Image (cartoon, grey):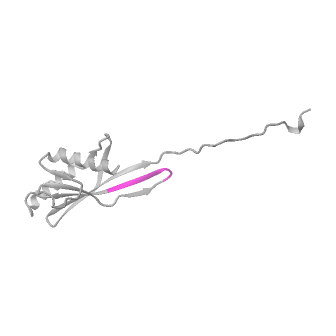
């Protein structure tokens, strides 16, 4: 399911920014091209709730490498656009997810945009089945 959320983030970025920006999720050995996004999963967690329910919290860092290093105005413009386009994403199967806990910071000329996409989960109910049952049927008192 985590890969589906990453695809949803990629689709939202492509819709908002177009094809001129490169969107990556895998590590690049030679470094990323300026004017590109890198989607990193930070620390997913699963919290059990009542009964069969649980909450899966997915924390993401969408990094943006500006076209001109050190151009804070460009990074702040991209950050504001990210706030809008990641408010709600559509997964490949059509489900909608809301982005929560959005914040951003610029570290070493890279924009780090943090967003959470939480999924409520319900485990399927597994009903235990009986294997076999043997019974002896008779009457009370011997029945004359």
Expressed as whole percent of the image width and height from the top left, the position of residue 99 reads: 29, 51
**What secondary structure prevails in the magenta region?**
strand
The answer to which of 38 and 118 lies nearer the viewer is 38
Q: How many marks?
A: 0
The residue drawn where x is 49% and y is 53% is 50
Name above or below for residue 32 compared with residue 16: below
Name above or below for residue 18 compared with residue 35: above
Is residue 52 among the parts visible in the rendering?
A: yes
Expressed as whole percent of the image width and height from the top left, the position of residue 70 reads: 9, 64
The residue drawn where x is 20% and y is 56% is 38
State which quarter of the image contains the C terminus: top right
Expressed as whole percent of the image width and height from the top left, the position of residue 75 reads: 13, 58
| The image quarter in which residue 29 lies | bottom left
Q: Which residues are magenta?
A: 50-58
The residue drawn where x is 36% and y is 55% is 57
Q: Is residue 38 rendered to the left or right of residue 99?
A: left
Residue lying farthest front?
29
């Amino acid at each position: 399911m985590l890969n589906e959320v990453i695809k949803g983030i990629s689709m939202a970025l492509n819709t908002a920014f177009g094809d001129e920006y490169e969107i990556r999720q895998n590590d690049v050995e030679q470094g990323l091209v300026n004017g590109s996004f890198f989607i990193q999963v930070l620390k997913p967690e699963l919290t059990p709730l009542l009964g069969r329910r649980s909450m899966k919290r997915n924390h993401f860092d969408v990094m943006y490498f500006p076209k001109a290093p050190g151009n804070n105005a460009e990074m702040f413009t991209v950050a504001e656009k990210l706030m809008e386009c990641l408010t709600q994403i559509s997964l490949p199967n059509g489900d909608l997810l809301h982005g929560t806990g959005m914040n951003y910071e610029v570290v070493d000329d890279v924009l780090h945009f943090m967003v959470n996409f939480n999924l409520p989960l319900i485990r399927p109910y597994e009903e235990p089945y009986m294997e076999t049952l043997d019974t002896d049927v008779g009457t009370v008192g011997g029945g004359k």
